[in-house]
Image (cartoon, grey):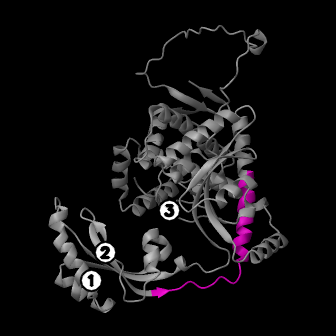
Amino acid sequence: MIKTAKNIIGSGRILLVAALVAGAALTSFASLRAQEDGNDNVSAKDDTSADPFDLPKSITMLGKENPNVRTATAVVNGFVITGTDIDQRAALVLDANKGAKISKEDIERLRAQVLRNLIDETLEIQAAKEQKIEVKAEDVANQYDRVAGQNNRTPKELDAYLTKIGSSPASLKRQIEGEIAWQNLLQRNITPFVNVSREEVNELMDRMRASKGTEEYRVAEIYLSATPENEQAVFDNAKRIVDQLKEGGNFQAYARQYSEASTAAVGGDLGWIRLPQLPTALADAVKELQSGQLVGPIQVPGGFDIVYLVDKRQVLTADPRDAVLSLKQISIAFPKGTTQEQAQPKIAEFTSRVKQIRGCGDVEAVAGLMGADVVSNDQVQARALPPALQDVLLKLQVGQATPPFGSIADGVRVLMLCGRDDPKTDTDPSFDKLMNQLENERIDKRAQRYLRDLRRDAIIEYN
C-alpha cells in the first residue's frame, strides 16, 4: 500500500487520489461517489396488478456472454470506459485494504461502485473541457511525481508498483486529471459566487465561546444518499460496508470510494466539530462513542451515515496531547529466529542498564555499552503517538523513560523524555478559519447539485 502526496492548490482544498490511502492527499474537491441503483426488494402479490409487465415466473435468458471478449462497459457522452479501466482502479482499493476479508460478492459490488466513480470522473473532465478549462499534462505529471516522493519512491518505482498490484500509471494519472479538472471547474463556476457574511461568522464565534470547555469531536463519515424507492437497498449496502470495516477495512479508503459527501476527498474527515453541528441522530450516536469506534448505518435526512470517531477534545481548551515532545528512542534488535528464552538475558540487561541512565545526556554512553541504537526527535506531537504511549509519556518528567516495550520480532525499546513544550490555551477561534469552514460547506452543497445535473443530462450507454 502506498501513501499520497500533499499539495495545496487554489482555495486550499485537498485533492485526493481516492484509492491510495494511509497518507496525506493531493489537492481538490471530491465528487459524490456511491449511488445505489434502486430497490430490488419488491414484494409480490397474488393478483397480476402487482406486475404491470405481466412477467412470466420462469425466466430464460437468450444469448450468452463470452468472458474472453473484452468489451466497453460504458460509453459516457462518447467516451469509452472498459473493463480494464475498472479492474485497474479497483486494484487500488483492494491494495489499500489488504487486511480486510473481501468476498467475491463484495468485489463485484466494488466493481459496480468503481464504474459509477469512473462515470462521474468522466463527466467532470468533460464538463471542464466544454468550458475551455484545460488540465495540463505537466500538472498531472507533477502531482504523480509528488505521490511517488511521498512514498519514498521514484516515479519509475511507482510505475512498477502500480503494475505489480494490477493497476497502472495511466489509471492513477486519469484520476488525478479528474480531480484537478473538477477543482478548477468549481473554482470558476461556484466558489466566486459563494458568500458568507461577517455576521454569520461572528455568530458562530459567539456560540463557540459560549461552548468553551465542552467537548468537540473529530469525526469521519461515509454518507450514502437514498430515496423512498431505494432506501432498503442503500441501507443493506451501508450495513455491508460497516461489516467490512469491522473486519479490518480501511475507513478512509471506503469513504473515498463509497461516500457521496464531498468529504470523500479527505477520507470522510469532517474535521473538529461540536455536537450541535450534527443532525440529532448523529449527535446522539457520536456522543456515546470512544475514539476509534464507529457506528451506523444511521438514517439522516436524504440517506444514511456511517460515522467514525477519530478523536475528541474540549472546545477552546488546551489539550495535553498537543504538547510537542523531545524524545530519544533506545532500542535493541534480535537476530531472526531468536527464541524468547534466548532473548530474555539480553532484555534483562537492557532493562537494567536503562534504569541507570542519568538523563538524556547519558543516553549515548549507556547505549554504547550494550550495543543499543539511539534515535532522537525533538518535534514529536504527543497526539501522534499510540494511545498507550501518550498516557505514559505525558506523566513523565524530563530525563525519565518509559518501561521497555516491543517484541523479539520488532525489537525492544524505550522512549526517554528530553523536553516538552506544552500547548498554549486557545483564547479565541480564528475568524478566517471559521469563514473558510462556512464557505466550504456551501461550496460542497452546490458541487453536489452540479454533479447531479451532469449525471442527469449525460448520455450513457452500457454494454
Q: Residue at x 35, y 49 (%)?
A: 161
Helix or strand or loop: what does disc 2 sit on? Answer: loop
Residue that label 2 marks:
404
Classify mark 2: residues with Cα within 10 Å, few (<14), some (14-19) or many (20+): some
Q: Is residue 442 magenta?
A: yes
**Residue 354, labelled with which disc?**
1
Q: Position of residue 458 (x, y in %)?
A: 69, 34
Q: Do the residues under discs 3 and 2 have CB atoms within 8 angstroms?
A: no
The correct choice, above or below, for 106 with respect to 311 in the image is above
Q: Position of residue 180 (x, y in %)?
A: 58, 54
In the drawing, does residue 155 fall left or right of residue 241?
A: left
Q: Position of residue 276 (x, y in %)?
A: 75, 63
> Which range is magenta?
420-446
Q: Which amino acid, mark 1?
A: Val
Q: Is residue 458 visible?
A: no
As measured in the structure, the alpha-carbon distance from the residue carrying label 3 to the one carrying label 2 is 31 Å
Helix or strand or loop: what does disc 3 sit on? Answer: loop
Q: Nearer the viewer, mark 3 or mark 2?
A: 2
Residue placed furthest toward the left: 342
Classify mark 3: residues with Cα within 10 Å, few (<14), some (14-19) or many (20+): many
Q: Do the residues under discs 1 and 2 have CB atoms within 8 angstroms?
A: yes
